[in-house]
Amino acid sequence: MLDKRWRAGVERGLAPVGERLRRLGVAADVLTAIGLVISLATAVVIASGHLIWGVVGVILAGLFDLLDGTVARRTGQASPRGSFFDSVADRISDAALLAGVAWYLGRTSPHLPVLAFAVAAASMVISYERAKAESLGLQAKGGLMERAERFVLLSIALAFNVIVPVLWVMLVLTMYTVVDRFRRVWKQAAHAPRSVHPQPRRRVERGDEPPSPRLRTWWEARRPATERGRSRERSVRRTRP
């Protein structure tokens, strides 16, 4: 929801920063890698209980996530390889941050970490639904809990130390988004053309292979005369009406 409404405006605001980075020769993949490292470090900070610094880390990770796309488009570096790297880095970042939250919650209860892992698992399903739908030529964008919403709510949870209530809200909205995306893709797939898969070729066994003409000629030349005569006689009988 936020990604659809505000991302374009935020990227326009960050365009001067992206242009400056482009002039400095900073590659988009480098920004993606820096954002991933910040996310991993932030997960450790959250797990250690420094929640305010965790908020700073989440904001920085989100900032680099926006900048790498801006630099890629402005420098012409946008490519399938860069998009793949960015998507994988985003998934690792999301999992790491929620793992840090789970570790922190484990100090007070052995059951609360399951809540954080449930949010992480549902978030991965959202990402998979979009990736699978796009691979089939369908659309699965949108929903109440995309990556931008997760970053915003996680920052609020850390800033005000209301992690458990916010995680419950995230879980409910995430599951709603999972069901909503599934429903929309299911309706699109009902009208999509079916792909025709070619039949697998039957494996030819060694005994099924016809003899080569050279081998047949060699054998005919060396067979006894009586056998050659019987063979010609049988072939004549087959050709008679």
Image (cartoon, helix red, strand yellow):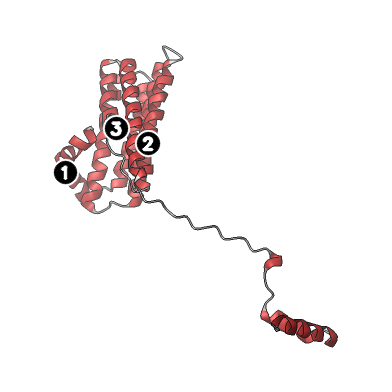
Tag 2–tag 3 contact (CB < 8 Å): no
Q: Amino acid at mark 3?
A: Glu
C-alpha distance separating marks 1 and 3: 23 Å
User: Which residue in the protein does label 2 denote?
Assistant: 91
Q: Nearer the observer, disc 2 or disc 3?
A: 3
User: Which residue in the protein does label 3 denote?
Assistant: 146
Percent x, y of residue 162: 29, 15
Percent x, y of residue 28: 28, 46
Query: Is residue 45 toward the left or the right of residue 12 in the image?
Result: right
Q: Amino acid at mark 2?
A: Arg
C-alpha distance separating marks 2 and 3: 12 Å
Please tell me whether residue 53 is drawn above or below residue 66 in the rendered image. above
Earlier sequence position, callout 2 versus callout 3: 2
Q: Residue furthest top?
A: 108
At x 14%, y 39%, the residue is 13
Q: Nearer the observer, disc 1 or disc 3?
A: 3
Percent x, y of residue 186: 36, 39
Query: Which quarter of the rendering shows the N terminus?
Result: top left
Earlier sequence position, callout 1 versus callout 2: 1
User: Which residue in the protein does label 1 denote?
Assistant: 15
In this figure, what is the number of numbered marks? 3
Q: Nearer the observer, disc 1 or disc 2?
A: 2
Please tell me whether residue 227 is drawn above or below residue 207 in the rendered image. below
Q: Amino acid at mark 1?
A: Ala
